[in-house]
Amino acid sequence: MIKKAEERAKPVRKAKRSIAKDGPSPIDVHVGSRVRLRRTLLGMSQEKLGEAIGLTFQQVQKYERGMNRISASKLWKLSNVLDVPVSYFFDDLGVDEDGQVPTLLGSEPSSGDTLALDPMAKRETLELVRAYYKIGDPLVRRRLFELTKAAAGAGDHTAVD
């Protein structure tokens, strides 16, 4: 017996993701932010990174914002140039309860951009870390580290009368 075309089971296809419609993939945004973080920590410009991996600085910008996906070969080149393992780009990335939407590990899901809440993604933090490691004397660097920890903890103590 031959079934009519309408009666035949059609495979259910998921709608193709579109950056224009859906925005960049959260995974691409996370990987791009890790590229930016490492590049900035190294004090490297987008132009220098682009030259090292055979791209323009505009393409590096697109990668860092997650607007363009990074191919496996480019990710490999980035890991070599930025001196990190490939897994570095996926650090702190988990999935939600359904195993679908990437989330930052250890963070509460919110309606806002969780990457913007990460203090390591802030320029101030990156500049501070870079300046800290420019201190040549290990003893001075250690004393500054201890001073910073003491200053951060100074507000934690309650006065005892």
Image (spheres, grey):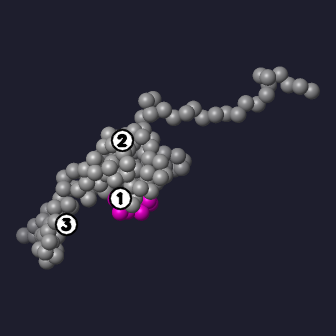
Quarter of the image where one finds residue 153: bottom left
Is 134 in front, or is 123? 134
Residue 133 circle label: 3
Which residue is the extreme one toward the left? Answer: 161
Nearest to N terminus: mark 2 or mark 1: 2
> Which image quadrant for residue 65?
top left
Residue depicted at 28% across the width and 47% down the height: 47
Q: Name the residue: 44% across, 47% down.
A: 70
- Comparing 24 with 50, the one in front is 50
Residue type beneath disc 3: Tyr
Question: What range of the chain is rendered magenta?
Answer: 82-87
Q: Which mark is residue 69?
A: none
**Mark 2 highlights which residue?**
59
Q: Position of residue 15 (x, y in %)?
A: 57, 32
- Label annotation for residue 81: 1
Q: Residue at x 40, y 59 (%)?
A: 79
- 157 displayed left or right of 35: left
Q: Nearer the viewer, residue 137 or 77?
A: 77
Whether residue 131 can be seen here: yes
Of mark 3 and mark 2, the one earlier in the sequence is 2
The amino acid pointed to by label 1 is: Val
In which quadrant will I find the C terminus? bottom left
> Helix or strand or loop: what does disc 1 sit on?
helix
Q: Is residue 68 left or right of residue 15?
A: left
Residue 36 visible within the image: no
Mark 3 burial class by Cα count in 10 Å: few <14, some 14-19, many 20+: few
Q: Position of residue 150 (x, y in %)?
A: 14, 69
Residue furthest right as drawn? 1
On the image, the x and y values in percent for residue 18 come to 48, 32
Give whichever of discs 1 and 3 has the lower sequence position. 1
